[in-house]
Image (cartoon, rainbow, N blue to C red):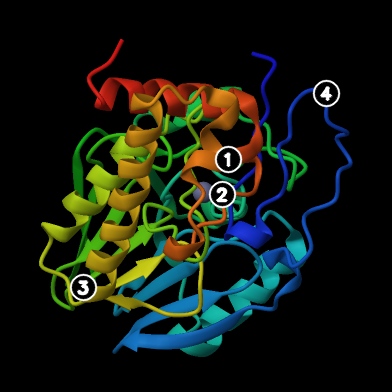
Amino acid sequence: MFHAMTGCAMLALCPLSAVAQAPAERPPAPGTPATIPVLSKEIMPGLFLFTGRGGNAVVRATPDGLIAVDNKVMRESVFNELRDAIAKRAGDQPIKVAFITHHHADHGGSNARIRADGAELIGHSNLPAILTTYTSTIAPRNPAPPSITFEREHRVTLGGVEAIAYHWGPGHTGADIAVYFPDQRVVVAGDMLHMAGDPAIDILDGGGSLIGFRDRIDDLLKLDFVLAIPGHGENAVTRDEVKLYRQRIQQLIDRGIAAVRRGVKPDDLRDAMRSDDLGFRLVGHFWTDPRYIAPIHAELLNAAGQP
Ligand SMILES: [Zn+2]
């Protein structure tokens, strides 16, 4: 496979496409989260959100160690910064269980370090294969694969705290998982909720789907959560905010379906769907690289019931 993929981040932070013909040394887009320090906040008692330096990381403290979801970009200094922030907030305990929401290197950059310290890495069963075709341009190498994989649902109990990981199908990528803490009614959604910018559909080699992206939000909403933690952004969001986001995604899809019905070709699809009123600018490689637009166009044609 010639294709290479970046991790994704909020719209303005998303590195441009890392295609084979692109210079490998292409710097990250301005405002990359790698430049933003790790900040932390307590979302619920013992449940902490760590923003900055890549995708959001979440840690749940238990009497028997820590449960982590994602771990930011791959850099020794970032790992140390995150580890120190976790120790300060959640206690100087080992991470015993580390969920990986998907393959992008701004979310699983420290997988190998955390695994070396003794944690089990838990991810979807599609993750190892996707990692074999992925080449991050924001990290010197790909995130380490999971040590434990699952198909649909995986439950872990540590120190009396239950965490349930779910995979419902393709969306942001083909290996998206959400991690639900039923006692606190909080779900960690990763980039399944890519609410800090455009919807990011890693549809080429990442296994994502635009229609699936909407459907995964519906799946999330079937969980009894009061707060959801997106893959980027400073805050957890409420159920109502997730519902509003779902509406915006549906409107975007509706515009895409209307466009293909009137014969808009892939080259013009982005302009036809662009929707400042919805807050989507559709910039970044997921929306500007023709190799991503073609399968989006095909998905929309299929959704429109047209060959
Ligand atoms: Zn991502």
Q: Is mark 4 within 8 Å of ligand 1?
A: no
Of marks 1 and 3, the one in the foreground: 1
Task: Give the left or right position of residue 245, taking residue 207 as reference.
Answer: left
The residue tagged 2 is 282
Task: Give the left or right position of residue 8, taking residue 153 as reference.
Answer: right
The residue tagged 1 is 287
Mark nearer the N terminus (1 vs 3): 3
Q: Amino acid at mark 4?
A: Gln
Q: Nearer the viewer, residue 303 or 238?
A: 303
Q: Nearer the viewer, residue 78 or 26?
A: 26
Disc 4 to disc 1, C-alpha distance: 18 Å
Instruction: Work out whether residue 153 can be spotted.
Output: yes
Mark nearer the N terminus (3 vs 4): 4
The residue tagged 3 is 239
The residue tagged 4 is 21
Marker disc for residue 185: none
